[in-house]
Image: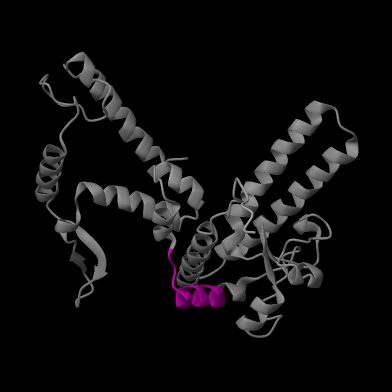
Amino acid sequence: MPITRDTAAVIQRWQDHHSRLDLPERNHRWLFPAPYGSAGPGHLATIRFATALRRWVAAIPELHSDLPGPDGAPLPFDRSLIFPYAFRHSYAQRHADAGVGVEVLKELLDHTDISVTQGYYRVSLQRKREAIKVMSRYVQDRSGESRAGSSGSTAGYELRSVAVPFGNCIEPSNVKAGGKQCPIRFQCAGCGFYRPDPSCLPAIEEHINALKADRETAAAMGVDDFVTRNLDDQAAAFTQVAATMRERLQALPDDERCEVEQASAVLRKVRAGRAHKLLPLTVKDSA
């Protein structure tokens, strides 16, 4: 899971400091070791960590929230909301909002029940509808031409399209099959029925990277030229789709771009929260 440079720098600084601490040998294996050598577990007790955190938060001179007050200035942040478990919750929620798959987040959080993880992905039907309404204004085709409103209302677009791995599809037979019978095996960037929108950008870019990796693997295997050529062509076509979409987003006014980004986050969250249903390991005869 990628992290920011700032986060990596903080971790490295703590690791450097940690290595210089004068601690009992068994305490060194903990991220937050106890500063003593008693018969305890060797790590900092929860109550001590919480106490230290409260003192640190109380010492911060100003802590603003994202909410503006009557005068337009940001309101103070409620410091009582800052406690150790809140960091775990925020970590999980931000990953869910970013579209990280529910199975991946389940592993990161070490949840035993995926339904607990799915709680971070709950999006009301109203929010989903609003996000789809916003996103429908920025639908394009494979060549980058705007297809906003080409299916009439938002509801009409939903009825005439189906989600595919890298956007939406309006090919009738595939729509009828729920997106599971693409005649050209999801080579979407070469299809006139392909309808991506900005919420699909991360998936498109991930697919481009996968195509390039597959191309290198295929070349190393010594396959026929048509195989690598097909992978090259797909990667180039998807790259063009993504580039055109990003150019259009950059050209939008700041408030409109922000609206698109928020709607995109909602839709990615909805998609990521769809856990794959696993088949049972055994089948019982009900007879």
Q: Position of residue 4 (x, y in %)?
A: 41, 41
Q: Position of residue 178 (x, y in %)?
A: 71, 67
Task: Classify residue 20 by image quadrant.
Answer: top left
Is 146 displayed left or right of 60 in the figure? right
Q: Residue at x 53, y 60 (%)?
A: 268
Magenta span has 9?
A: no
Q: Nearer the viewer, residue 228 or 41?
A: 41
Q: Residue at x 10, y 47 (%)?
A: 59
Is 269 displayed left or right of 75 in the figure? right
Is 225 displayed left or right of 65 in the figure? right
Which region of the structure is painted magenta? 122-134
Q: Position of residue 159 (x, y in %)?
A: 67, 78
Residue 212 drawn above or below residue 278: above
SS majority, magenta: helix
Q: Is residue 80 visible?
A: yes
Q: Nearer the viewer, residue 203 or 75?
A: 203
